[in-house]
């Protein structure tokens, strides 16, 4: 009887964990919330602005390289400071390279945040699938265990141990089967 009560306790635990997902059943239920949509739109607009700034900095660096094509360069890659144009290009180039580093880091961080938010519905769906498969497996395991207890009617430890092993195997198989079924249902 202890095994039966422990299975019932596990089933109750899995049902309680599914309360927050009570309204989820189809793919559309895992869509982004309004706040998440606003945030992704804001990040996308910032991403576009950073992309424009990034392209303007790249074009500035290209222009500097074009203007300084006839100037001699130092060993460190800067332009010779013997001419006024070389001094100006070195100043503009150092500012552009510093800006490029910061803009690129902001650009890639925004890109990473957008990818994270766009993948959020799939993450929620996978979590729901895992919990739902465990809940369904617990339900079936309790049913099978009840049938085994009724059929065997024995209180011998060997029989109970065999029942525990059988239920553990059945539970594991059901979790895997239901997880695949739920994932197919969600991600189609």
Image (cartoon, helix red, strand yellow):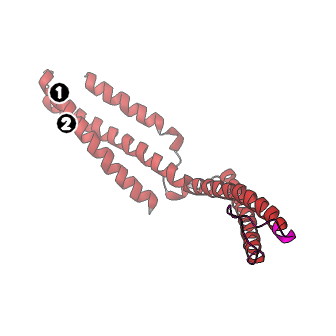
Residue 147 in the figure: left or right of residue 65: left
Q: Position of residue 110 (x, y in %)?
A: 66, 56
Give the secondary structure at mark 2. Answer: helix
Going by the picture, which residue comes out furthest to the right?
Answer: 84
Of 104 and 158, the residue lying toward us: 104
Give yes or no for residue 70 being in the magenta stretch: yes
Q: From what the image shows, is residue 128 above or below residue 168?
A: below
Q: Identify the residue under disc 1.
A: 161
Label 2 neighbour load within 10 Å: few <14, some 14-19, many 20+: some
Of 110 and 63, the residue lying toward us: 63
Q: Identify the residue under disc 2.
A: 166
Going 15% across and 21% down the picture, which residue do you hit? Answer: 157
Counting residues from the N terminus, which is met first, the one under dot 2 or under dot 1?
1
Q: From what the image shows, is residue 48 above or below residue 134?
A: below
Give yes or no for residue 143 being in the magenta stretch: no
Q: Position of residue 150 (x, y in %)?
A: 18, 31
Q: Quadrant of the C terminus?
A: bottom left
Residue 91 in the figure: left or right of residue 136: right
């Amino acid at each position: 009887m202890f095994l039966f009560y422990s299975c019932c306790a596990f089933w109750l635990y899995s049902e309680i964990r599914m309360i927050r997902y009570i309204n989820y059943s189809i793919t559309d239920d895992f869509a982004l919330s309004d706040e998440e949509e606003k945030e992704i739109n804001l990040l996308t607009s910032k991403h576009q602005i950073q992309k424009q700034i990034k392209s303007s900095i790249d074009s500035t660096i290209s222009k500097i390289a074009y203007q300084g094509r006839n100037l001699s360069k130092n060993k460190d890659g800067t332009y010779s400071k013997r001419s006024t144009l070389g001094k100006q290009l070195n100043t503009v180039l150092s500012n552009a390279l510093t800006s490029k580093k910061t803009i690129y880091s902001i650009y890639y961080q925004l890109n990473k945040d957008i990818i994270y938010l766009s993948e959020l519905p799939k993450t929620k769906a996978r979590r729901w699938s895992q919990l739902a498969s465990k809940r369904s497996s617990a339900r079936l395991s309790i049913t099978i265990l009840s049938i085994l207890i009724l059929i065997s009617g024995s209180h011998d430890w060997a029989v109970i141990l065999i029942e525990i092993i059988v239920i553990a195997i059945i539970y594991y198989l059901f979790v895997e089967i239901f997880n695949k079924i739920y994932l197919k249902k969600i991600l189609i």
